Image (cartoon, rainbow, N blue to C red):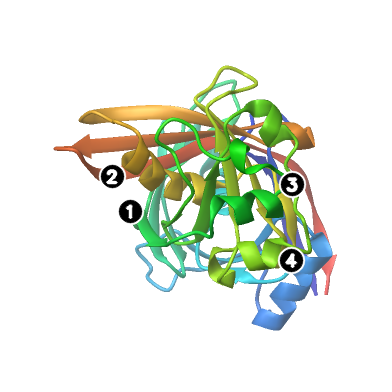
Amino acid sequence: MRRKYYVLDVFTERALAGNPLAAVIDCDGLDTSAMQKIAAEFNLSETIFLFEPHDPVNTARLRIFTPRAELPFAGHPTLGAAILVGELRARDLLRGQDLSVVLEEPIGAIACVVRHRPGKARQAHFTLPRLPSRVGMPQSSDRLAAALGLSSADIGFDRHVPSIYSAGTAFTFVPVATLSALAGARVRADLFPAAFTPAETAHAFLYTRECVAGHDFHARMFAPTLGITEDPATGSAAAAFAGVLMAFEKIPDGNHALVIEQGFEMERPSLIILSLDVEKGVLVEAQVGGAAVIVAEGHLDL
């Protein structure tokens, strides 16, 4: 059977940057094992499979796979899916207005908006289906630093210390004092599994306030247990990062938007927009957004 697929670059306004995403749209007859094998064949950080929704009021349902595992939620697959669905189903409508898309994922239904942007790359944002929460305590800074090829003096800045937060997928957040130290980080395969444990939190999101391109934070993400040596842009980590910001920054009431730059060390520059809505010192809503471009399409003969 021939199965149509697309490849998008997400969190970028131009091709061959951002985070690549494979999207298979002809999924009839594919079981979990087959989808996992296809994701391994593409060997991108994530591959999605689009289905008709369980609830007809929603737009589509998707399943998300890394080369090694299925995820309940991920950011760049959600944005890429929303933009692709908008292009395939409502291109004419998008020429004149924004488009609302609701995607069913294992974590729940996610509300997305695809923006009308004449002459520019498509851009979308989604509202977090679950607000971030602290889900554990990390290992010591010494162990984290050693597992990342850093020194303990490199860990932490201002009020920021290592933490673990999740907005659907858990990440160990490691603040790094300088951009130069962050650029030199690398996974120590012999030390990483013991330092980033348990397995469900073994996703290391490193960040610093020093930036390459004048944004708010610079980041890198390593998840070797998922088959991701390094990720060019991690929307689900940005979602959980909202909890980190509420814990360690003094964020006043109101609406705030900041930009996280990622992927620069991989020559896949990516820009993730994180928006926070704070009331009486409490995060009441957050959104993750960014642009994406379709760069390829083809068929799988399976």
Q: Nearer the viewer, mark 3 or mark 4?
A: 3
Q: Residues within 10 Å of mark 2 (few under 14, many from 20)?
A: some
Of residues 22 and 17, the one nearer the viewer is 17
Check the image and name the residue furthest to the top: 214
Q: CA distance from mark 3 to mark 1?
A: 32 Å
Left or right of residue 186: residue 99:
left
- Could you tell me residue 86's position as x and y percent? 52, 45
In the visual, does 15 lie left or right of 140?
A: right
Taking 17 as reference, is 49 above or below it? below
Tag 4 residue: 67
| Residue under label 1 | 131
Q: Is residue 128 visible?
A: yes
Query: In the rendered structure, which disc, 1 or 2, sits on the residue that comes first in sequence?
Result: 1
Q: What residue is shown with label 2?
A: 285
Give the residue pinned by disc 3: 149
- CB atoms at circles 1 and 4 under 8 Å apart? no
Query: Between disc 1 and disc 4, whose residue precedes?
Result: 4
Marks 2 and 1: in contact by CB < 8 Å? yes
Q: CA distance from mark 1 to mark 4?
A: 27 Å
